Amino acid sequence: MGDTAESLTPDIMYGWRVNALKNWIKEKDGILKMEDFQRAGHLDQFHYLGLECNDDIIDILHINAKKKVLDVGSGIGGPARYISWKTGCKILGLDIQESLVQASTEISNLLNMANHLSFRACDATTDSFADTATYDAFYSILVFLHIPQNPRKILFGKLFTSLKESGSFCIEDYCLKDPSKPFTKAEMEALTEIVGAVYVPCQDDYKNQLEQAGFQNVQFEDLTETWSQWTIGRRNRFLEKKDEHVALHGEQVYRSMETFYNTVADLFIGGRLAGARITGSRGKVNADLEAGRNLIKTKKRGAEEIMANVIRQI
């Protein structure tokens, strides 16, 4: 898949999310705690598998209270809040959208988490992000797909520089499953206009770009089947609960959500879109990362577990 000149996050994907979460917060009585947000599901955790994905990242990167972590494309702050609350680590979240950074900060302050969480609005592909040897780890969940090829290469270089010598990373992202079978014209339009995916390379190209930035020990874990089942289940569950969602968010927001969820499910059904968890490190060997990879191998999710996760999210 070729790339466009600019990063893209369509309003149909993100425009409804801040208001949707704020509507959910308004419906709650009393002082909110992090435990409450574990029931917010897809309104607080935009990514596949929700809190289970966050737990996987904690395990893979061996995140603990001693580590300083970077969240690249932090969105409304759901993963950062959960991971910091669960481990006691300090996290800086970066996002290009001012409205999401403002909402992240407001919600985190509401939860009295300012000592461990901070959010910064910046384009991390530019000089506005120049941190050096600062972070023990970074993670990014379904973000790089919005960034074109050349800016992405710049960003990878900056992220490499931002890590300590012992640093590691975890990325979850889209890939083209088979470079000999490119996306159709309709799929390209759906990826760009609805999902905002401006550049979706095959696995080999993705790995080469990370290694060119300096990263070593890069490995891919195929998540395509899990994500396919999950996005189809999410779409079906969402449609089943139409009346509830319309009552909470209104007809217009519901329609935006419906379009987005249908589109993503159809892309995975098409068989050309793949999902991957990508891990690696600044150095050739990273003991924490190796231990984390071995731990993740013990986690198995069948169809029943995936559907149970969907039900908790939607």
Image: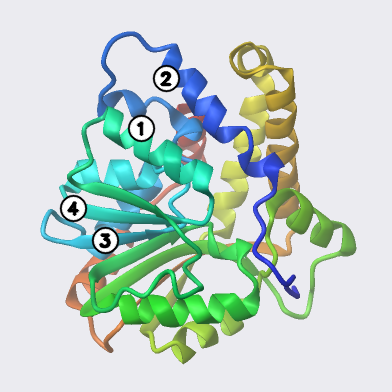
Q: Position of residue 89 (x, y in %)?
A: 18, 53
Count residues near mark 4 (Cα–Cα under 10 Å), then give few for <14, some for 14-19, many for 20+: some
Give the Cα distance between marks 4 and 2. 25 Å
Q: Position of residue 297 (x, y in %)?
A: 33, 62
Count residues near mark 1 (Cα–Cα under 10 Å), then give few for <14, some for 14-19, many for 20+: many
Q: Which residue is the site of mark 2? A: 25
Do the CB atoms of the residues marked 3 and 4 lie less than 8 Å apart? yes
**Nearer to me, 115 or 86:** 115
Q: Which residue is the site of mark 4? A: 89
Count residues near mark 3 (Cα–Cα under 10 Å), then give few for <14, some for 14-19, many for 20+: many
Looking at numbered disc 3 in the image, what kind of residue is underneath it?
Answer: Val
- Relative placement, left or right, of 9 versus 301 is right
Q: Position of residue 98 (x, y in %)?
A: 51, 47
Do the CB atoms of the residues marked 2 and 1 lie less than 8 Å apart? yes
Looking at numbered disc 1 in the image, what kind of residue is underneath it?
Answer: Ile
Q: Is residue 47 visible?
A: no
Q: Which residue is the site of mark 3? A: 69
Looking at numbered disc 2 in the image, what kind of residue is underneath it?
Answer: Ile
Task: State the image quarter where residue 114 is shown.
Answer: top left
The colour scheme used here is rainbow
What residue sits 31% from the left and 73% below the top? 131
